[in-house]
Amino acid sequence: MVYAPIMDSMSEQSFLILAALADQPRHGYGLVTEVAAMSENRIQLRASTLYAALERLANRGLVQPERDEVENGRLRRYYRLTDAGAAAVEAETQRMIIQSRAAKRRLARRARLGLIG
């Protein structure tokens, strides 16, 4: 299934997972740390939450497993962003920009009307 921004809204967790994969494939722990960094530690993904989200995103064709590696005796599965996933990140980014601009206009109008305080 291809992401359709008009039909779906993207959770912040999904957006951050996809954005974390935009520049390189990452394994689970790498995604957890990157999402935490991108969210300034507001979002701390648990492994179960991450892997459930990755499964949903993979079912939608937004991410896919790239490779498995064994490091220190532990299997690490790397995920990569698909072209559909990159398009979804771009669409969601544009949606957020539009909403942020609308909110800023309303806040400026509020200030002009003297509604502060």
Image (tube, grey):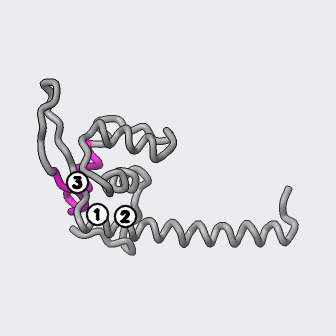
Q: Is 15 in the magenta?
A: no
Nearest the viewer among 33 and 112 is: 33
- The tag on residue 57 is none
Mark 3 in CB contact with mark 1 (< 8 angstroms): no
How packed mark 3 is, by other alpha carbons closer than 10 Å (few <14, some 14-19, many 20 or more), is many
- Three-letter amino acid code at the position of disc 1: Gly
Secondary structure beneath disc 3? strand
Q: What is the magenta range?
A: 51-65
The three-letter code of the residue at mark 2 reads Val
Q: Residue 84 appears at what percent x and percent y?
A: 26, 68
The quarter holding residue 44 reads: top left
Q: Is residue 52 magenta?
A: yes
3 or 1: mark nearer the eye: 3
Say left or right for 83 vs 20.
left
Residue at 22 percent across and 54 percent down: it is 80
Question: Which residue position holds label 3?
Answer: 80
Residue 85: which disc?
1
Q: Residue at x 18, y 55 (%)?
A: 64
In this figure, which residue is indicated by the disc labeled 2?
Answer: 89
Amino acid tagged 3: Arg
State the SS at label 1.
helix
Labels 3 and 1: the sequence-earlier one: 3
